[in-house]
Image: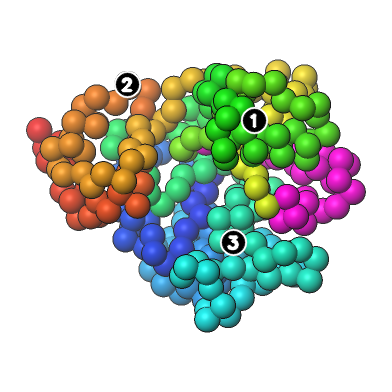
């Protein structure tokens, strides 16, 4: 069995949601070695230290980033969002850094595989992560043919992924690999970054910063799908581990309970996007109501 770790990029605005995620991991998830918490920027890392434990490691983001990337002063923001500066590229946003951190941590962690879990997820069913992700073949989430050429973001991310990997122009509709609770294999991530360097002649971090419009999940999925070696080491799955609420609609307790009742048997987590405005205490209460029922 391969060793598997959890990986969560987070920041101060997600602190409450991250706390609920930790509660759900500690009560529902088994079969993993460590939970790496990647805090962006470093100045907020101390706020997450109370969650540290022998299996939960708080990692300031600078530990995983190249020296030529640093956060701009707080007063230099755009719509309240932090930006990052470098002498080698235009400023990049926090979500660019978050994607780079996922790749960097997957490379640096001693475990063979990582399960990437965002702060606005929580586990509501018992889940043996090692049994799910530790077999010979790594699960690769796939939404077959979901990306249309007229999709303003996904189509650009797909084209840029193919360009970074030195692949021909993609055909549409293309497969989508974006989801929640995604599993990556370390050897595949390493080969992916090596391919980007071979294609662009630049370190993979700098190539991504200069590309700007990219998706780490589409990059990984496209790389695996077009590599006979790594495609053979993965097994596609078309049911996400998480039942997601992507809309801006605020949810009440009954709605959250209905989500859990309606979830596919293979779905062990909920993703309730933070921009929905659903209060964390309401989510916590709904889970207790459902568990008690």
Where does the image place residue 138, in percent across and percent down from the top left? 60, 27
Q: In front: 45, or 273?
A: 273
Category of crowding for the residue at label 1, using alpha-carbon neighbours closer than 10 angstroms: few (below 14), some (14–19), many (at least 20): many
Category of crowding for the residue at label 2, using alpha-carbon neighbours closer than 10 angstroms: few (below 14), some (14–19), many (at least 20): few
Element at label 1: helix
* Chain-order first, disc 2 or disc 1: 1
| Residue depicted at x 37% and y 23% | 266
Query: Is 199 on the left or on the right of 152, as rendered?
Result: right
Q: Residue 122, can we see it?
A: no
Q: In front: 211, or 181?
A: 211
| Residue depicted at x 73% and y 50% | 211
| Residue depicted at x 64% and y 62% | 92
Query: Is 75 on the left or on the right of 199, as rendered?
Result: left
Element at label 2: loop
Where does the image place residue 144, in percent across and percent down from the top left? 55, 19
Indicate the quadrant containing the N terminus: top left, top right, bottom left or bottom right.
top right
The residue indicated by pointer 3 is 93
Where does the image place residue 285, in percent across and percent down from the top left? 15, 48
* Chain-order first, disc 2 or disc 3: 3
The image quarter in which residue 244 lies: top left
Q: Which mark is residue 265?
A: 2
Mark 1 vs mark 3: in front: 3
């Amino acid at each position: 069995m391969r060793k598997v770790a959890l990986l969560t990029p987070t920041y101060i605005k997600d602190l409450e949601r991250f706390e609920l995620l930790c509660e759900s991991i500690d009560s529902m998830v088994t079969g993993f070695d460590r939970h790496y918490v990647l805090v962006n920027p470093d100045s907020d890392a101390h706020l997450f230290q109370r969650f540290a434990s022998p299996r939960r490691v708080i990692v300031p983001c600078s530990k995983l980033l190249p020296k030529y990337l640093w956060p701009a002063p707080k007063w230099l923001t755009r719509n309240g969002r932090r930006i990052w500066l470098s002498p080698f590229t235009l400023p990049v946003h926090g979500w660019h850094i978050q994607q780079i951190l996922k790749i960097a941590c997957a490379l640096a962690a001693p475990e063979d595989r990582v399960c990437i879990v965002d702060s606005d997820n929580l586990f509501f069913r018992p889940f043996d992560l090692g049994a799910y992700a530790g077999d010979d073949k790594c699960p690769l989430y796939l939404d077959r043919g979901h990306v249309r050429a007229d999709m303003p973001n996904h189509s650009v991310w797909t084209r840029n992924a193919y360009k970074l990997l030195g692949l021909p122009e993609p055909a549409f509709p293309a497969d989508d690999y974006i989801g929640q609770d995604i599993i990556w294999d370390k050897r595949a991530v390493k080969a992916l970054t090596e391919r980007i360097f071979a294609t662009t002649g630049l370190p993979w971090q700098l190539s991504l910063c200069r590309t700007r419009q990219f998706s780490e999940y589409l990059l990984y999925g496209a790389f695996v799908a077009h590599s006979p070696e790594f495609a053979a080491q993965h097994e596609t799955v078309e049911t996400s581990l998480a039942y997601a609420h992507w809309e801006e609609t605020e949810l009440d307790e009954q709605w959250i309970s209905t989500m859990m009742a309606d979830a596919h048997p293979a779905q062990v987590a909920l993703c309730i996007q933070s921009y929905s405005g659903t209060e964390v205490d309401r989510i916590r209460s709904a889970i207790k109501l459902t568990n008690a029922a």
